[in-house]
Image (cartoon, coloured by chain):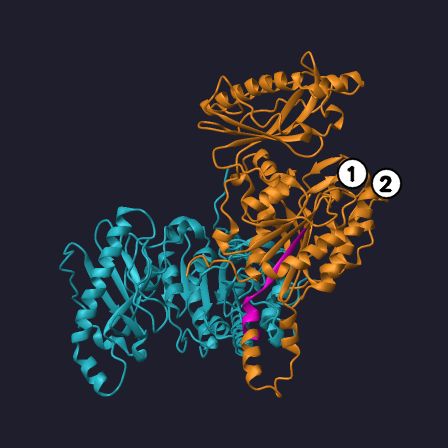
Chain colours: A cyan, B orange
Amino acid sequence: MQKFVDARNCDFERLSLITLILKSIRFRRIEIMKAILVVGDGMSDRPLKELDGKTPLEIAETPNLDKVARAGVCGIMDIISPGIPPGSDIANIALLGYDPIKSYRGRGALEAFGANIPVNEGDVAFRGNFAYIEEGIVIDRRAGRIDGTIFKDYLSEVHLPSHPEISVTVMPTLEHRLVVVLRGRGLSWKVSDTDPHKDKVKVLKSTPLDSSEEAERTAFIVNKLSEELADLMEKHPVNRERAGRGLPRANGILLRGAGEPPAIKSMRELFSIKGGCVSATPTVRGVCRYAGFDVYDAPGGTGSINTDTISKAKTVEQILPDYDLVYLHVKGTDNASHDGNPRLKVKIIENIDKMIGHLLDHIDLDETYLAVTADHTTSCTAKDHRGDPVPVAICGPEVRSDSVALFSERSCAAGGLGRIKGMDLMPILLDFLNKTKLIGS
Amino acid sequence: MQKFVDARNCDFERLSLITLILKSIRFRRIEIMKAILVVGDGMSDRPLKELDGKTPLEIAETPNLDKVARAGVCGIMDIISPGIPPGSDIANIALLGYDPIKSYRGRGALEAFGANIPVNEGDVAFRGNFAYIEEGIVIDRRAGRIDGTIFKDYLSEVHLPSHPEISVTVMPTLEHRLVVVLRGRGLSWKVSDTDPHKDKVKVLKSTPLDSSEEAERTAFIVNKLSEELADLMEKHPVNRERAGRGLPRANGILLRGAGEPPAIKSMRELFSIKGGCVSATPTVRGVCRYAGFDVYDAPGGTGSINTDTISKAKTVEQILPDYDLVYLHVKGTDNASHDGNPRLKVKIIENIDKMIGHLLDHIDLDETYLAVTADHTTSCTAKDHRGDPVPVAICGPEVRSDSVALFSERSCAAGGLGRIKGMDLMPILLDFLNKTKLIGS
């Protein structure tokens, strides 16, 4: 990229032929634009009593986010529609420009594909936990946060005697978490969880969530599989040893978040976009993979509150030359919000701000659009997602900059973008990249 | 509610056990939020020559509405979509959060249910007038504003000899007005009025408004019923007596506004919301009943220009402890607008402002969201509904307050809500009440 910058500084009077060549290069530069979309997970919030009626974004020291807002065009954005709280899965689908309601088919496949386990059209995937269960009651739904990867080989050949036509993949991921993929005909993602999502209650039976034969059959299979997995896990020698040491056994598997691949085409196919993603969060990685993006790890990018945001910025800086668009996601702000910890949220926002600072210092803003937003509002009071709009700011060569000088929920509401929908942001960026298609003629 | 207010002011240091109990109450308070939605019927207007280019809202002295705007987040709202004038029926459907276009099935059922006459799925209801008709020409479409309740018993057993399978209910309501409900199979609300809506023209024949067999059959039944009712009314002794006194006879019934129940589920079913409604306007009461709200009268709440707005506020104050959400509707502003009387409209707006003042003084704003808006713009010049957006302001514990300091059509346009749709307002309020459901996971 550096050579184009040099080209602009040449003495064109002195160079005749070279001038022409360079001019043609300069002309081409207009066409080659890049974009970075930075998503702070649940970064948006409500005014909080604990912060004297300010939001964490308003309290945090964010000179670089403010620089983006000041140089750019700002607005607020309803990820789905006003007042409707989106989950992280559907929110990132919307931010990638897809109609979230039409495209969404559950979280399981996103999570699995994000963890490098392919889930194809027709497969149904689940998130799961190794859990400690006694007489049908969940004692510890994380089995003492056991490292489940020790069961990887043991679970690599699970069969369902009742349904030999269904292939089953069980793949431990991080800590007590795992992914299960069912493959075979006539499956549906419209089935409920076996995970009751809390301890000291009964393990649930999966039930069909619509009236289709496929959902009924899938729920039946899930229940059979759960029995089969409980039998297998009960027998595992580690559990005898853990029982001896007074540790919660991992004698069952709880499943949740059934999902098929989202009903989307890759952005390469749709817009000839080459996309990269920097995120440590499986769901986000999964959504991006289904969108056709290459997914990168940043060293020290933990997907948690201690993530190394500068490392994430450096990774973006490194991969940007190879991509039209890079999707940069930071999870920590959401974790702090779910914990009801606004002060921690402020701190992580300040780390995100430093990440933005690194990007501003190291990318060429003459050929790069930089957009910053959140995938949803997470209220530190409610400790959950809420339907308030999120702020958005876009800076870059040809944005219609407005008078907004601060990046926050309230300041951006006065911006030149007005109030847009989540699925509108990506077309706006693609349009700056000259990648949108004319409708009509 | 008062006890919660006291709880917040307790000296927790001095009280040990009680402290714990009160703290748990305080904790619960976060979840137990309430909302009041105040709707000034047709309160929104255009800048008027007679008011030196100001709107009635801009001219009126409204310190309390302005307080809501100043403390809250403001915006403008297209009840259906920009430029489209909504009727009161469809507008209130939208304000309750339903998709107005998909849900709407005419006014008749709303009006009937609002007047305590149940209209069930499949029934078709009409509004009607007792009218004076000579040789098929409408002489007085209100029959001298006759009190139609004197015909109540006389009309209680109307039969249709041509269609014995259809049951007919005719119920006089206020003055010359009545409601007719048809019950039986294969009816449709897609039929036109027999009421020509003005005097000195022919009574109309009802015609089908779509190509369905049901609409054709219903129109046929409506015309038969109109003949039957005219025969009955012609014979009534009161008419002989009125003729003798030179008064317009009530010798016919004009029908209008065919409607089936709106295609909506109750908000209790959808969101576990317990809703109350304070309104004297049958259509609004009907919409709220279909939304599953309990409907209350306020003493002196007339549904007209002389309504006692303070009494309405007191009624809200009384019922609020029993409800999650109270819908408070004041009709008078619309009446003044239809009469083309901007000065009267200003006066009624000032009465609405006093009502808001009473609410602000008597509700606990730490646990209540207060929203104010109009159901449509009614132009005092056009004396009819217009498609301009309406102003909206929401104040309450965690709104993202903006810099708007006055409640009016123009000032609210600069607010933090931006421009939303009518059906978006209720999800925004439900989200503050922690009653929305996450989409995705």
Q: Is residue B31 magenta?
A: yes
Instruction: Check the residue under mark 1 and report the chain it is in.
Output: B
Q: Which residue is mark 2?
A: B50
**Is residue A384 left or right of B35 when viewed as pictured?**
left
Mark 1, secondary structure of its residue:
loop
Residue B380 numbered mark, or none: 1
**Is residue A72 left or right of B132 when viewed as pictured?**
left
Residue A246 numbered mark, or none: none
Query: Please, is residue A250 above or below residue B125 in the view?
Result: below
Instruction: Check the residue under mark 2 and report the chain it is in.
Output: B
Residue B15, how many percent across, how many down?
60, 86
* Tag 2 and tag 1, C-beta contact below 8 Å: yes
Q: CA distance from mark 2 to mark 1?
A: 10 Å
Residue at x 63% of width, y 56% of height: A400
Query: Please, is residue B335 above or below residue A350 in the view?
Result: above
On the image, which quarter does residue A72 sit in?
A: bottom right
Which contiguous range is marked in magenta?
B26-38
Mark 2, secondary structure of its residue:
helix
Residue at x 60% of width, y 54% of height: A419
**Is residue B95 left or right of B244 when viewed as pictured?**
left
Residue A303, how many percent across, how many down?
41, 73
**Circle 1: residue type:** Cys
**Circle 2: residue type:** Glu
- Please state which of residues A23 and B380 is positioned toward the viewer in this rendering: B380
Residue at x 62% of width, y 69% of height: A47
Q: For residue B145, say whether it is visible.
A: yes
N-term mark: 2 or 1: 2
